[in-house]
Image: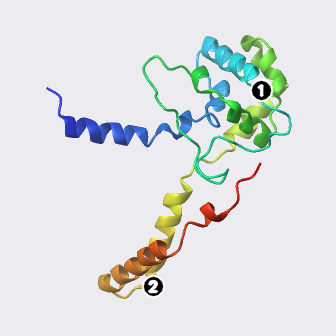
Amino acid sequence: MLNADISAVAVRAFTRHLWYLTAEIVTIALWSKNVPDTDRRALADRLLAVKPAADLKSPQDRYDSGFGKPKFPDSVTATTTLADLVGNDSWYMFETLELDSMLLNKDVSYWENSDEYLAAITSIESLNAINDGAERGVKLSSDFLSASKSEGYYQDVLQVVEQDRHRKSNLRKLRPASK
């Protein structure tokens, strides 16, 4: 028997982990030994098919003019493949890390011995996965907690911060959209 409330909570929890399924991040799967060669080939072929203009230097499919969060896929099902998640923003990883895209034209079985692949692995393995928003919140809370003398004082400070957030508009919304 299914419990609708528990199912809804579980689905919400899983959707918080979809960040790696964005078009920007999915390309990292090209360098994963856990992804079958056929899937990596399909991912490479799809990337080559959607290659954006050379002057595109930042992700476009984001909430709020390039400064916001990347948009997550509309629907991910049991039949969704990595290649299905590729978009123009998938090239942003290549641009940011200065990865050599010539690798995509080569046979997947050759990749692990190529200089392009080895250089990309070094760059990708140096990436740190962090949740900036959550880490800033924890830092802010811990700073306030260490400055407070009592739980009541700490709660007062948190309420002031919350009131201030509601009073000030979101600065990201004030920036003009870049073209």
The residue type indicated by label 2 comes to Ala
**Figure coloring:** rainbow
Judged from this view, the residue extending furthest toward the bottom is 149
Residue at left offset 18%, top offset 29%: 2
Q: Secondary structure beneath disc 1? A: loop
Marks 1 and 2 close (CB-CB < 8 Å)? no
Image quarter of residue 104: top right
Left or right of 113 in this view: 70: left
Q: Nearer the viewer, residue 78 or 52?
A: 52
Q: Which comes sooner in the sequence, label 1 or label 2?
A: 1
How would you rate the neighbour count of disc 2 (Cα within 10 Å): few for under 14, some for 14-19, many for 20 or more?
A: few
Residue at left offset 53%, top offset 38%: 72
Circle 2 residue: 147
Image quarter of residue 44: top right
Left or right of 28 in this view: 94: right
Left or right of 114 in this view: 79: left
Q: How many marks?
A: 2
Vertical side of 148 occupied by 46: above or below: above
Residue 139 in the image, given as x and y percentages of width and height: 51, 69
Residue 136 in the image, given as x and y percentages of width and height: 53, 65
Quarter of the image with the N terminus is top left
Camera sees residue 37: yes
Depth check, mark 1 against mark 2: the one in front is 1
Circle 1 residue: 51
